[in-house]
Image: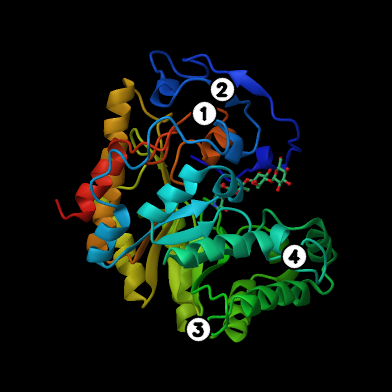
Amino acid sequence: RHDNGQRMYRAPMTAVRPVRLNRRAGLTAGASLVGLSTPGTAFAVGEPASMNRQDHAPGTAPPHHPGSQVASRLRDLADARGIRIGAAVASRPLVAEPAYGDVLAREFSSVTCENVMKPGFLQPSPGRFDFQAADAIVAFATAHAMTIRGHTLAWHNQNPPWLERVAASGENAGAALRDHITGVLTHYRNDGPVPVPAWDVVNEAITDTGALRDTLWARALGPGYLADLFRWANEADPDARLFYNDYGAEGMGRKADAVYELLRGLVQDGVPVHGVGLQMHVGIGARQSPSRPDLAANIARLRALGLEVHVTEMDVKLQTGTGTDDERLAEQAQVYADILGTCIEAGVTSFTFWGFTDAHSWIPGFTGKPDGALPFDTTYAPKPAYHALTRVLAGG
Ligand code: G3I
């Protein structure tokens, strides 16, 4: 499971090195995951996720027309069920590949910026905010009647070096983080011209064993820091819906219990927290995704605190399973269907994938192996997972 070590992401990644993928490269015996997507040029492990396995030249149409095999759009079906269906969006393909924007606007009713709303992008140097890239995605979303999930205000990754230095010095760390939150939420106030209705205020503050994670913010601000972040965000925009977001806390278990207890305490103390984001980075194969009863029970107890529950970053890795390509794709479709079905029944109000096309997914770069974790393949054709999701949304 992804341990959030994130070492790969810290390495400087400069030149893009195209490599020919052997159809079985990096796979377990008998597998041919690469066959799941158009074979051809791929990019070496360690390159930015957004550059992985681009199978057609930027700016040109993909080989299959993305509209050809779709009967009903996810977003129309989701509207009818009263749930938002979303995708994390990368800036580069949105500009470079027409099919990317076409499918995004056609299928989804919510967007999350995969990277460009993180502090390293929004405040690259002290007091100098740069909203350009984020606002371009917000403008796209607004033009296509999509809502926006803001991601993320406080995390231990993707901070600008200056902010890391301030946090490490301990002096003025709280003021710096508070200024960041205030600057961002003022720009995106819900009574202003560029409203962002929901925010992941804090990302991944609990460890896999259920302890408070030892981060730059926990060290600088002390164990009670999470409550302050929500209060600062609420002061900056009282209309924003404020979320705690984490991975590996979807089903029942040590980490899920810790997240629940954290939120129970915050709610009890009157802290303005409105929801929980369950990331849902899962895989096929035994114990790689939460069981339906566990997921339902966890969502139910979080909702019983008065919190809204969103699925914020779902993808389903194929590399964790076995079998032929077709078998893996069928299993992946089942995992997507089981989780979406459980979430709809349990009252989840927003369901977001971490990307939507296998052409642009963080998974190969992070795991070092080719995969195909999303509902559309690298040519933007819908996969069995897509069809399973439409069936669930249609109530079948
Ligand atoms: O911005 C630089 C760019 O200037 C440079 O040219 C390029 C070349 O290396 O790198 C760019 O930064 C990359 C950044 O994405 C933007 O593309 C980083 O190297 C890369 O590490 C970073 O990865 C992101 C990762 O968060 C960072 O930890 C992934 O795309 C993104 O999918 C991932 O998202 C996280 C969620 O925020 C929280 N939950 C887990 C999830 C997956 O790790």
Q: Residue 55 carries which label?
A: 1
Which amino acid type is shown beneath numbered disc 1? Asp
Q: Earlier in the sequence, mark 4 or mark 1?
A: 1
Calculate the distance from the C-alpha at mark 2 to the C-alpha at mark 1: 6 Å
Calculate the distance from the C-alpha at mark 4 to the C-alpha at mark 1: 33 Å
In the structure shown, which secondary structural element does the residue marked by tag 4 occupy? loop
Q: Mark 2 points at which residue?
A: 41
Q: Name the residue under label 3.
A: 239
The crowding category of the residue bearing disc 3, from other C-alpha atoms within 10 Å (few below 14, some 14 to 19, many at least 20), is some
State the residue in front, 14 or 75: 75
Q: Mark 4 points at which residue?
A: 123
Q: How does the figure colour the protein chain or chains?
A: rainbow
- Residue at 44%, 18% (x, y): give it: 28
In the structure shown, which secondary structural element does the residue marked by tag 1 occupy? loop
Q: Which of marks 4 and 3 is nearer the N terminus?
A: 4
State the residue in front, 177 or 375: 375
Q: Is residue 75 left or right of residue 89?
A: left
Q: Nearer the viewer, mark 3 or mark 1?
A: 1
Cβ–Cβ below 8 Å for labels 2 and 4? no
Mark 4 within 8 Å of ligand 1, using the beta carbon: no
In the structure shown, which secondary structural element does the residue marked by tag 2 occupy? strand
Calculate the distance from the C-alpha at mark 3 to the C-alpha at mark 1: 42 Å
Image height of 200 relative to 30, above or below: below
Residue 167 x/y as whole percent: 79, 65
Cβ–Cβ below 8 Å for labels 3 and 1? no
